[in-house]
Amino acid sequence: QVQLVQSGAEVKKPGASVKLSCKASGFTFTTYALHWVRQAPGQRLEWMGWINAGNGNTKYSQTFQDRVTITRDTSATTAYMELSSLRYEDTAVYYCARELTGTLDNWGQGTLVTVSS
Amino acid sequence: QSALTQPASVSGSPGQSITISCTGTSSDVGNYNRVSWFQQHPGKVPKVLIYGDSKRPSGVSNRFSGSKSGNTASLTISGLQAEDEADYYCCSYAGNSVYVFGTGTKVAVL
């Protein structure tokens, strides 16, 4: 079955970077796009960007354009999301999700990133 | 890209029907047939209910239906049940490979 398994919780200091992983299984990795979505505590879902796992093309939200990098390793069927220059307000659960027919049909379990001094 | 606008909360009694609106612009909701709706229970992962404005994935109850008129999409939940109490988010393609989520709506079953 389709599975997206994300890396564990992280605690980072302001100004640091964090790199999260999303291990895919149960489908042909290179024929899909993978998106990253975050949710701050008690807040709405926020789209961050996506990667075409086949050709590696990416697109980012203007909100995160200068700080986010999404990559993938096809041999490991894993997508990564790196967010730099972390701020307290980046404390959130970060999700990866697979795109199918224009929607996000399968989601990872989420990774909590806490930014704290 | 601004978030799509949803009401903060909607409530209804068991068995009733409720509708949640999602208002965007002619650059997103009104320009593409690519609005999705997600349900999220507290502490849980979002689940897709509707895609392509009005299509329902297999396994999703037919009590959930989607529609769109102009720049506003809507999710209707009929035969409201206690388990429908959750947060609901719309999401639209906004062109240039960009997506945008709505502000979210908390549904309460009275």
Image (spheres, coloured by chain):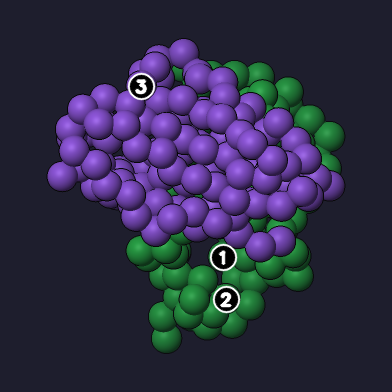
The residue where tag 1 is placed is A18
Residue shown at 65% from the left, 52% from the top: B24
- x, y percentage for residue A67? 70, 69
* Chain coloured purple: B
Q: Amino acid at mark 1?
A: Val
Chain under label 3? B
Residue furthest out toward the top: B58
Residue shown at 27% from the left, 35% from the top: B84
- x, y percentage for residue A36? 60, 48
Q: Amino acid at mark 2?
A: Leu
Residue shown at 43% from the left, 55% from the top: B7
On screen, residue B64 above or below B7: above
- Mark 1 vs mark 2: which is more N-terminal? 1
On screen, residue A10 above or below B107: below
Q: Quadrant of residue A96?
A: top right
- Describe the element under mark 1 as helix, strand or loop: strand
Res. A6 visible in picture: no
Task: Give the left or right position of residue B6, taking residue A9 as reference.
Answer: right
User: Which quadrant holds the C terminus of chain B?
Assistant: top left
Chain under label 1? A
Q: Disc 1, disc 2: CB below 8 Å? A: yes
- In front of the other: label 2 or label 3? 3
Q: Amino acid at mark 3?
A: Arg
Mark 2 neighbour density, 10 Å: few (under 14) some (14–19) many (20 or more):
many
As drawn, the label of residue A86 is 2
> Foreground residue, B20 or A103?
B20
> Foreground residue, A28 or A106?
A106
The residue where tag 3 is placed is B63
